[in-house]
Every structure is written in structure tokens, then in C-alpha cells.
Image (cartoon, helix red, strand yellow):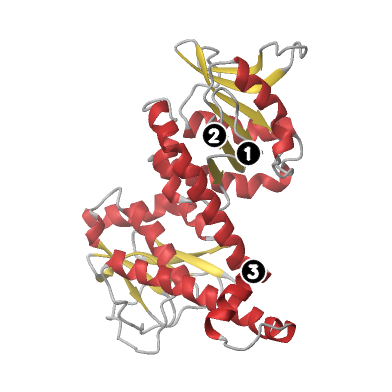
Amino acid sequence: MEFAERLAALALKVKNQREAIQTEEATKNAFIMPFISSILGYDVFNPLEVVPEFTADVGVKKGEKIDYAIMRDGEVQILIECKKSTEALKIEHASQLFRYFAVTNARIAVLTNGEVYHFYTDLDAPNRMDDKPFLVLDLSDIDETLLPELSKLTKDVFDLDSVINAAEELKYVGALKRAIAAQFREPSDEWIKFFTTKVYDSSFTQKVREQFTPLVTKASKQFLNEQVNDRLKTALGSSFPAATVTAAAEESVTSEPIAEADLDRDTEIETTLEELEGYQIVKAIACSEVKPQRVVHRDAKSYFAVLLDDNNRKPIARLHFNGKKQKYLGVFDEEKNETRHAIESLDEIYEYAGAIRASVTSYMD
């Protein structure tokens, strides 16, 4: 399983089990130890690689412990401090990391609650842990641009120098992206005023502020969606031709034979960003068996089809995302019968990776 797939699988595990985890110890066992082992690749049961409850006397603080120390060649390289999954991370939680960072050889410190991981180093002053992380990994919303740098901390390709060299840019680019994202979610007064004065010539009064707040919010979100759609169109090399299907999908979870007739084109069809994101996940799974260019999509009024070789007689999966409330993923058996599975989020598509790959390999036979 590739690095990104392992991370996606852990993210799904965290999502499904988060509500059942109420203590710090349970968080370690359910989320953090799997992160260390399956994502970073270290043996959590080998004390030469991972030391739990690592102890190093710090000044007057005797016998104080850090949750995990990751070792390489007998030296501490990464320190990890854990909090329970129900607790939001704060810099106040990192007091032990600050102390241990100064008295060990570690250049990377991690503060985590099992879902969010804050990675720190010493950019501001040598041997003194920074107040702000240079990398923030949120398993509920994975930023794929961070994965190449994160992978450099894994056991097989450990490259600390490269990570440190990239840390300053990662730190500020990440902080800027989070600040921009916050403005898209809930624009500040300064953001509203900045854009309003670009298009509105009169005085910026309270009444104008109230008028333009929803307008700036709406325009910001529409702009972002348009940019994402344009990037997806470029990446897929497609202008998203519209299509429709001869048989409508039913609302309930059922098994049904696939329609053999060709899909007719229909200009009323709207391909959504969510459908394209789902297609990319299915394609990533299918590409373990075939070349990427063989996995294509056709949109329809009733569903979004993912096909092998652009042949509707070779269905890989169907995305039934047109309902207002419930989404379904359709997968196929050897007889091309479709079974729909209710899903709450796109990440759950990974749960059916085996069925998707089986469909692809059945056509290869």
C-alpha cells in the first residue's frame, strides 16, 4: 500500500472511532501507535526504534517523561507528546516538548491528539523548539502537498536535513494557507473592507459593510470553486462532456443489473466537484491494476460512471451523489450486478477498494 493510501486508511479509522476514544491512553493505542508504525514505519515494539515513556532529567524536573521517542542509530531523532483525541491542541500542551527538545539530539518534535499532528523544529533559535509548527497534518482534511515532506521522516527514507531545509517555507506557507482558509470560512472585517473598496466607490459605512459581507463571502467561495474546477478539468484533460443513461437509479440500496445500452449525451447534466473528487479516488484505487489513462468517467443524470477503456460494458464503479441527503457508491460483482453502499464521506470509498480492484481485474481476464 502506498504512503498516501496508508494515511487515508488511518484517517478513515480516526473518523470512525473518534467518538469512542475518551482517554489519552486509548488515543495512543488506537491512533498514535498506528501512525508511528504504519505511516512512519517504525516498530513500536522495538525499544531500539521507539521508546515509550522516554525519560531525560531536565534541570530540576526529575523523572519527567515524554510519550514517545523515535530513535535512529542510538540517538533520539523525533519526540512525540500525546493528548487525548477529544482535546484541541494548544501550545500550552507542549511544555514537556520544549524542555526535552533542549536536552536531547532531537530536531523534530510532534504534538498530537491522534487526529491533528503539529511538527516543530528549531528555526528561530538553535536547540530551542519554535513556538509555531512548521507542518500541520490534519487527518480530517489531509493537505496532499505536505505528503512528500512528511514521507521524508519515515524509517525507509529518513532525510532530516531535507526536512529542516524545507521547514521555514513549509511553516509560513502553511500558516498563510490556514489564514486564507479562515477568511474563506468566516471573512474578517478587514477582508470585507479590502475587497469592498476595490469595487465600491462610496464611503465604507456600517450599512455598506452589512450589505457586502454576504456578497464577499459568496464571491470568495465561488471563486475558489471555479479555480478547483479549472484545475480538475486540466488534470483530467477533459471538458466534462455531458451524458445521460437509459435506466434511472433507484433511491434505496439494491442490487441491479447494469444497463448495456450506450449512455446518451444530455446538456442538462451538471458534473459536480464532489463527483470529480470521488472519481479521482476510484481512479487511484483502480490504477494499482491498470494504467491511469484506461480509467475514465461519464456523467449521467442518475449517476456518475467510472469505466474501464471508456466502455460502459466495463463498469468499475458508480457514484450516486445526486441525492440531497444520502450518497451511494455502486460496485459490481462478476455478473456486472451493481450493489449500492451508503457512504457519508468520500473517504469511505477506500473501504471498497477490494471490490473496485476486483471489477478491474475481471475485465482483464
Instruction: Give percent across and percent down for residue 316.
Output: 34, 62
Q: Is residue 152 visible?
A: no
Type of residue at label 3? Glu
- Residue at x-position 76% and y-position 35%: 23
Query: Disc 1 designates what residue?
Result: 114
Residue 193 shown left or right of residue 357 in the figure: right
Q: Is residue 128 above or below residue 228?
A: above
Q: Residues within 10 Å of mark 2 (few under 14, many from 20)?
A: many
**114, above or below 281, in the image:** above
Foreground mark, 2 or 3, reads 3
Quarter placement of the N terminus? top left
Amino acid tagged 1: Gly
Side (left or right) of 183 relative to 3: right
Total number of numbered labels? 3
User: From what the image shows, is residue 276 above or below residue 347?
Assistant: below
Q: Which label belongs to residue 35?
A: 2
Question: Which residue shows up at 60% across the image and 25% down it?
Answer: 128
Q: Kindly state the secondary structure of the residue where label 3 is placed.
A: helix
Q: Secondary structure at mark 2?
A: helix
Horizontal and vertical percent position of residue 325: 61, 74
Residue of label 3: 190
